Image: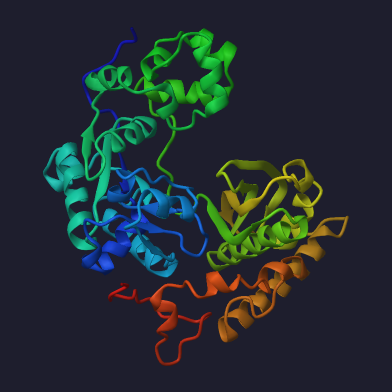
Amino acid sequence: MFKISKDYPRAIVHIDGDCFFAACEVMKNPKLKGKPVIIGAERVIVSSLTYEAKVRGVTRGMQLHEVKRICPEVIILPSDYETYSLMSVRMFEIVRRFTPQVEEYSIDECFADITGMQRPMNMSYEKIGLKIKETLDKELGITFSVGLAPTKVLAKIGSKWHKPSGFTSIPNFRIVDFLDQTPIGQVWGIGQNTINFLQKYDIKTANDFANQTEHWVKAKLSKPFYEIWQELRGTAIYNVKAPYQSISKTKTFTPPSHNRSFVMAQLSKNIENACIKLRRHELASKKFFFFLKTQDFKHLGLEIKLSQPTNSPTEVLELIEPRFTEIFNSCLEYRSSGVVMLDLVPVAPIQLDIFGKALRIEKLTKLFSSLDDLSTRYGKHTAFLGSSLKAMTHHEPLLVRNTVPQRQNLLFTGESLRKRISLPFMGEVI
């Protein structure tokens, strides 16, 4: 049994929205409360669902025809990503009232480091965590599950302990109790292949893993799992990152496709969007990770390091194109693609070199600066890379186009589908 202390050396909060997309729809239309609601009409599969739908046997990724068979009374709605994004922004703004150190992990979840905030807020870490949850629930009209712990991995375990609308505190002296009841497969960062490997050594719970010796973990597993092992034992390895330590862009396309050029075009569009955001914040990336997601929600990706920081999509694409075939399989159907720009640094002045690369970078910088000006004046993607053409000109099937959120059919004066003001649609959907 590993030794633990009784204090709270770090106080990390993980906040997770409960059925976020579906919950946003119920918030917009209270008549949906208590009913089985699913999101994904435009994709013909379930992307989010309420707990009322879950108890009837509906699961994420299920085909809509199968949903209707097991739950005839189900209410099927299209995805309203504009509203979800606005709710996400408000969520993070609320959390930042309590601490500036907030890491936006996904659209509906984040980490927050509240270490040292006891005295300024005149309350314990548990009360701060509860106050964050209560404020989010009240002001956004949807519920959140919150975990408080000395590390990010433990906080993730805590936020899933009591769902929905739960708050779970895991101080150091209670770590063993929680790990003993946590299957190894529920630990953040441990996938199926690693689960299968650990089970061969009779490691079935998080506590079984945490009780392995340091020598055994280092000998049998790679560095990321050694870091997880440390986090499970209460040693904080993963810091809560400041805003824009990374920038990610993903896009789900309908219908799914096994066409190489089309999937590559979707990835190219994501890269353009990520680089637009990098330039907007005067940042550059030193490495990036790109991935594809199959129709059965499996991720396939590669990480690539850059010789020098960049925010140019053409430089990123030059590195991706020869590696794309390593993860693309024409026998599989893909539903989304994405890119994560990592190790971000402020844009630095260009230094001349004898090989002429600096001059090329300077020309690209001027080119994309002009494209950014065009986008500001005439709308995003007024001009775009040829590699993104199939994604930019892709038209979804009639079934999808007729299944759109009401906000898209209710443009305000001066709005277009490209240029919108940030207001959610608050009205009936059935």
Task: Report the residue that reaches farthest toward the right.
Answer: 355
Does residue 196 appear anywhere in the picture? yes
| Residue 303 in the figure: left or right of residue 403 | right
Residue 377 position, x and y percent, is: 57, 86
What residue do we see at 75% from left, 56% from top?
Answer: 259
Q: Is residue 261 above or below residue 179?
A: below
Q: In which quarter of the image is the C terminus?
A: bottom left
| Residue 407 in the figure: left or right of residue 298 | left
* 132 or 426: nearer the viewer: 426
What residue do we see at 60% from left, 79% from top?
Answer: 375
* 276 or 34: nearer the viewer: 34
Q: In which quarter of the image is the N terminus?
A: top left
Residue 410 position, x and y percent, is: 40, 84
Q: In this view, does 410 lie above or below 121?
A: below
* 187 or 49: nearer the viewer: 49
Q: In this view, does 129 lie above or below 154?
A: below
Residue 188 location, quadrant: top left
What residue do we see at 14% from left, 38% from top?
Answer: 124
Does residue 337 appear anywhere in the picture? no
